Image (cartoon, rainbow, N blue to C red):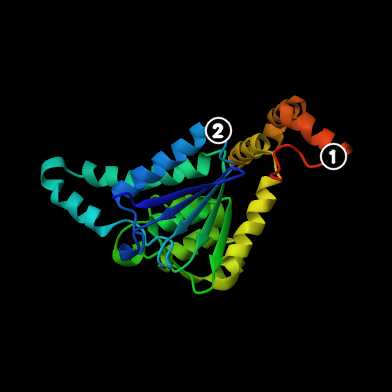
Amino acid sequence: MNSLLIRREAGGVMHIVLNRPEARNALSMAMVAELRAALAEAEAAGDVRVIVLRGSGGHFCAGGDLKDMAMARMRLADEGPAVLQQLNAAFGQLCCAFAETGIATLAVLEGTVMGGGFGLACVADVALAVDGVSLRLPETSLGVVPAQIAPFLVERLGYSQARRLAVTGGRLDGAQALALGLVHELHAADAIDAAVQRNLAAILQCAPLAVAATKRLMARALHHSPASLVDEAAAVFTAAALGDEGMEGIAAFVEKRRAKWVPA
């Protein structure tokens, strides 16, 4: 049975709902594979401009599925530690895929957010939280390591805050996550849908190729000094300005009309 619900909207919006409510949407290996496939499908389609990630049943995602972990442990005798390494790496590869996509991503966080779900929250371009959300990083309190989440946590929050959460078995409510910058907005449950629509409308005002190019350049800026990127950034700007989107954007501004990529 598919563990995702996928719905397309006019204007280039794809909604992906994690749909294992009985397990608080824990990430089984099947769900990881389905999420990777859904993202690949969206990228190949060429007309998906925003992906909205949500969970069903009042929770976003409770992390990895313990059943998969138990099955991997049973295979240790025959396959050795590699079986656990592959399982763990799959979650990191999922987060990397969403972090690197040129498509804008928006995550709606409610209920439980742990493990791989915490990682997906960290890589979302826009993270909206619902009052009552509980974000947890409990791995160290269980004697294990938040191995795949740690790099994204450092990227999102900075080294100092990421370390603090790791050594305290981090627990954050919505207000704390908002104060740290882990989430960008916090809303009551009855206001979250309106917040999603407002953010979608803002994203869809922006040209899709320009968004993708900007995301790529910002990702490089994490690991390179501004001075080292001057020439590359100028080339990126020039290509955009002389491309179809740049020409259309300037024309729309001068003519005081909506750009062609903005939904009517």
Q: Give the left or right position of residue 95, taking residue 160 as reference.
A: left
Disc 1 marks which residue?
253
The mark total stands at 2
The image shows residue 13, relative to residue 239, as above or below, that is below
Say which element carries label 2.
Answer: loop
The amino acid type, in three-letter code, at marker 1 is Phe
Residue 102: image x %, image y %?
57, 38
The image shows residue 155, relative to residue 179, as above or below, that is above
**Can residue 201 be seen from the camera position used here?**
yes
Disc 2 marks which residue?
46
Q: Nearer the viewer, residue 147 or 20?
A: 20
**Mark earlier in primary sequence (1, 2):** 2
The amino acid type, in three-letter code, at marker 2 is Gly
Q: Give the left or right position of residue 46, taking residue 55 as reference.
A: right
**Can residue 180 be seen from the camera position used here?**
no
**Residue 231, picture quadrant:** top right
Residue 184: image x %, image y %?
61, 61
Q: Residue at x 82, y 34 (%)?
A: 250
